[in-house]
Image (tube, grey):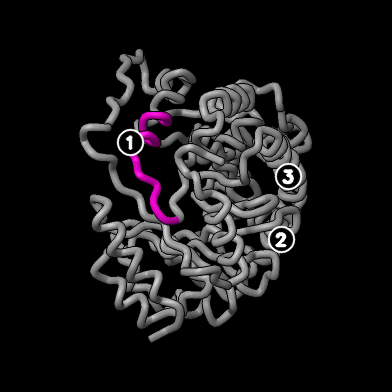
Amino acid sequence: MFDLKPDFERVLERYEAWWHCQIVDRPLVAIAFPVPDARRLAPPHKQHPTVRDRWLDTQYVVAAHETRLQNTVHYADALPIAYPNLGPEVFSAFYGCELEFGPTTSWSKPILTDWSKQSLSQLRLDTDNFYFRKLNELTDALLEAAKDTFIVGYTDLHGGGDAIAAFRDPQQLLFDTIEHPHAIKRLCDTVTTDFLSVYDHFHQKLSAAGMPSTTWLPVTGKGKCHVPSNDFSCMIADEVFEDLFVPGIIRECRHMDRCIYHLDGPQALRYLDRLLEIPEIHAIQWVAGAGRNYWADWIHVYQRIQAANKAMQIPSVPAEDLDLLFQSLHPQGVWISSVIGIENQHDADAALARIAQWTTKT
């Protein structure tokens, strides 16, 4: 189906089984490593006046994606995915937030100065907005380049509490959760409706082009896949998260066929049990944060997820740690999204052979 992933249909079966904490023939594992030096392509080189110009140069962005994918062996269940990216707060930019770009990410400027009717009335989703049109342009250009070669996903979309935090500024929104909770709930409901509309727009565009559903997190499945999140939740009390934001998260999840929740940071870990109770959340991506990301430090978290019969992503497992992984967890519902230390075909074959034998906890 895709030149860079000719066995995609079989791989899709493994992802579908993973969502249901099942195994087709072996546990789900993505292994990627560089193509041999003789086959490597030079990345595109172009001088841009500003960092912003580089982000918005569609031709350059597409060429960079193509080179990256061609220079990588997508082994086992690794997927050759490119997605249009203008940073994690681009959804808020659709309402008028201006984006500022750094070398590797972007951030938005708040626009909601207060909770007056006048201010809220000016906060409207605009699908003729510059950034919305740019994402359409990037998506179309990637689809044109992809043909039958690689997979194109949708951009990183953060609705709900993260969108409102971008409108208002996270620190100010903390005070608002005390002073204006009802206004936040109403806005969250409106934003969630808009979010689902935006999601469907890009899903339909990609689906019509024959693309499976995927995004910045390289996971896929049949139907609509989604990565719900609320990074703002790490700064608020449990009851505030439950009252103001959980209803919107559930709405997002019920709109989808497959959902893996992005749980980011130790302060958000206290919500894990609540999230595991939501039937429409099928998997958890636990991100411990910078300086805390050694996977084995969080075995107890992964065991809690497995006890709830949910799937999960385990990122960045060193090849020498595979035996510890096998001893600590059951293979059902485990997605090893990266094996560290794989530099060539020989290493990849050896790691996959070990993983293929892991069908029960030893």
Residue 143 visible: yes
Q: Nearer the viewer, residue 349 or 328?
A: 349
Residue found at x 52% / y 36%: 83
Q: Label 2, label 1: how many angstroms apart (C-alpha)?
A: 39 Å
Residue range highlighted in magenta: 65-76
The amino acid type found where label 1 is placed reads Asn
Task: Find residue 196 and name its label.
Answer: 3
Q: Is residue 52 above or below residue 347?
A: above
Q: Which of 227 and 109 is in front in this view?
A: 227
Taking 115 as reference, is 338 left or right? left
Say whether disc 2 or disc 1 marks the residue closer to the N-terminus.
1
Q: In this view, does 246 lie above or below 109?
A: below
- The secondary structure type at the circle numbered 2 is helix
Residue 198 visible: no
The amino acid type found where label 3 is placed reads Leu
Task: State the image coordinates of residue 160 (x, y, percent, origin top left).
Answer: 65, 50
Task: Find residue 71 and name its label.
Answer: 1
- The secondary structure type at the circle numbered 3 is helix
The amino acid type found where label 2 is placed reads Ile
Q: Label 3, label 2: how many angstroms apart (C-alpha)?
A: 12 Å
Between disc 1 and disc 3, the foreground one is: 1
Q: How many labels does the image show?
A: 3
Q: Is residue 49 above or below residue 264?
A: above
Task: State the image coordinates of residue 55 (x, y, percent, origin top left).
Answer: 44, 25
Label 1 near label 2: C-beta < 8 Å? no
Image quarter (top left, top right, bottom left or bottom right) of the N terminus: top right
User: Residue at label 2?
Assistant: 250
Task: State the image coordinates of residue 239 (x, y, percent, origin top left).
Answer: 64, 69
Image quarter (top left, top right, bottom left or bottom right) of the C terminus: bottom left
